[in-house]
Structure formats: C-alpha cells, structure tokens
Image: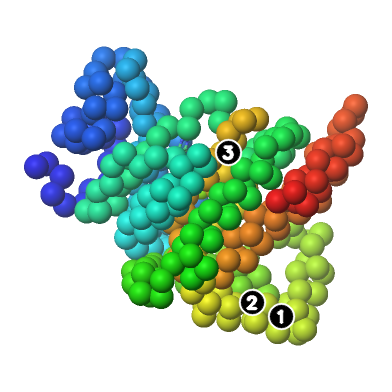
Amino acid sequence: MAFSEFRPLDENSLIEYIKATPSLSSKIGHNYDGLKIKEVGDGNLNFVYIIVGPSGSFVIKQALPYMRCIGESWPMTKERAYFEAVALKQHGGLCPEHVPEVYHFDRTMSLIGMRYLEPPHIILRKGLIAGIEYPLLAEHMSEYMAKTIFCTSLLYRSTTEHKRAVVEFCGNVELCRLTEQVVFSDPYKVSEYNHWTSPYLDRDAETIREDYLLKIEVAELKSKFCERAQALIHGYLHTSSVMVTPDSTQVIDPEFAFYGPMGFDIGAFIGNLILAFFAQDGHAGQGNDRKSYKEWILKTIEDT
Ligand code: ADP
Ligand code: MG
C-alpha cells in the first residue's frame, strides 16, 4: 500500500490515493475522466479538496502537523483529524439532516472523505455579510444543537457510556488548549496573536485589558470550559462552521470537539449572530439600510 505513513497530499498524489481507496473511488463511479480537483481551504487550519466527476463527488480534508494560517512555526497535532472524524460520525448519527456524511477516514494520513456540500451551499458568515435571509436557520441549528448536545449528555446516557466517551475526547487536549488560549486568555492581555484596528480601537482593547471584573467573569467561564464534561460539543460553532442554502443547514469542522459545557456551542452560535447584527451597519449601502435584515437576525437569535 502506497500510503502506509503520513504524507501531505497534493493534487497528483490525491488521485493515486483515491484510486487506492474503494470507499472514495466508488463515490465517483471509478471514473477518472473529466475529474475536477480544487483546493478550497479558506479555513485557518487544514487543507480541503473538492473532487467532482461526471458520476459523483466528495470532499477530502487533510490535517497537517501545523496550523495552515500561521505555518510551521505553530505546530498542531494532526490527530485533530481523528477527533473531527469521530465527532462528525457521532453528531451525524444523531442528526444526519445537518451534518455531512463521512465516507472515509484514514488516521495515519489524518484525512477525512465526506459529502461535498455542493453549491448553492455557502459559508453562513458570507451569507450574513451579503444580507441573505435563511428562514429555516434557527429551526435547523436548534435541532442540531438539541440532538447532539442532549443525546451525548447524562440527560440521555448512562454514566458508564459517558465516562468512556469523556476519556476518549480528553485526547483532544491540544485543540482545547488553543481555545483556552485564544478565547479565554489572549484577548484580555497583551499577546502576540492579538490584533485589532489600530490606532482606532487601541483604547477599547486597553479598556478590556484593564477591566478586572470582566477578567474575573471570563476566568469563571474558562474554568467551566475546562472542567464541565457535560456533552460532546462541537467546540467551534461559529458562522464559518455552518454551510447553508435557503433550505439546507450543514454543520462542518468539529475538530475542536470534546466533552465540555453545553453553553459553549449555544453561546458561540448566538454570539456570532450578535456580532453579525452589529456588523450590519458597516454593510449598509445605498438603497439598503439593512434594517429589516437586522430584525431578521434578532428574530433568528430569539427563535434559536
Ligand atoms: P478548517 O478546519 O481549516 O477551518 P473547514 O472544515 O472550515 O477547514 O473547511 C474550509 C473550507 O472548505 C470551508 O470554509 C468550506 O468553504 C470548504 N468546505 C469544507 N468542508 C466542505 C464540504 N463538506 N463541502 C463543501 N465545502 C467544504
Ligand atoms: Mg473552518
């Protein structure tokens, strides 16, 4: 077997890999004529390839042992692909309507093959910037969160099952540490990877760094994040982890998944909608003041 050890794929070796992998080659009917491969990873961490042929399609996502957006200077375990695959499968089993199906997982290669969310699916954040309303978003996201969070918590499971699952996901410690750092610590102190619109927001950033009451509150939240193994949460549920059309809502990218507090997913999703709400004034233009769109965002928050 040509791929007995890890190697980063490129568009050529990807074809070889697909040919050697029946669960993938069958998805395109073993037909390599007119196959189109495109690397689309606009994300921060990983490489994503879209493979479309005349007889079918899928997506390949590969984790490399560092962070894509920073480079080799920020090493990051490629084992994150394993936790992403397990979370996609478990959440997909509980809520297949809103999670892309996993066709293939290769732990050695840190590689996931999954359903291609074909156009007109776009990243929700882009839809929010464009001012597109998604009438089913609240219903779909609340269904996704309710099913995945409830069914992986002790409201539903036995303590034996729960503790076993918690142990497994403790292995995703590196990604959890990243959240601990960039969500719960860095924004409140001077830190290398912080950035803001300087000099305009210098004073605001400083106000946050000097707000000791806020920092105590955030420390409480951080403690919950680290200590409360309540349910298998997505861990990264912002509006770039959701792909949408007016009638489909699909949650991708759960590589930060672990047993944590339910409120972290719910809060991330709603918090991102609040950010989108406040960003609308900046997107308002001639002939569209975005007023009714802001109303829709508020209604989506309430409905969720
Ligand atoms: P990262 O972990 O690097 O953030 P993502 O899982 O967010 O990677 O994927 C990066 C981009 O690739 C997404 O923003 C989306 O545009 C595209 N993508 C990822 N998964 C799929 C999919 N199943 N179908 C279609 N596009 C996808
Ligand atoms: Mg992403």
Q: Residue furthest left?
A: 1
Callout 2 crowding tier (Cα within 10 Å): few <14, some 14–19, many ≥20: some
Q: Which residue is mark 2?
A: 221
Q: Earlier in the sequence, mark 2 or mark 3?
A: 2
Note whether 217 is above or below 122 in the view shown: below
Q: Is residue 189 left or right of residue 253?
A: right
Between marks 1 and 2, how big is the CA–CA gap?
A: 6 Å
Secondary element type, mark 3: strand
Q: Is residue 296 visible?
A: yes
The residue drawn where x is 61% and y is 73% is 184
Mark 1 crowd level (few <14, some 14–19, many ≥20, 10 Å Cα):
few
3 or 1: tag closer to the N-terminus: 1
Q: Does the rendering let one see residue 122?
A: no
Circle number at residue 217: 1
Dot 3 amino acid type: Thr
- Tell me the mark number nearer the camera, choosing from 3 and 1: 3
Provide the residue designation for mark 3. 249
Q: Quadrant of residue 86?
A: bottom left
Residue at x-position 40% and y-position 53%: 90
**Is residue 266 found left or right of 275 in the rendered image?**
left
Depth check, front residue: 93 or 226: 93
38 to the left or right of 25: right
Q: Answer with the quarter of the image where residue 103 lies.
A: top left
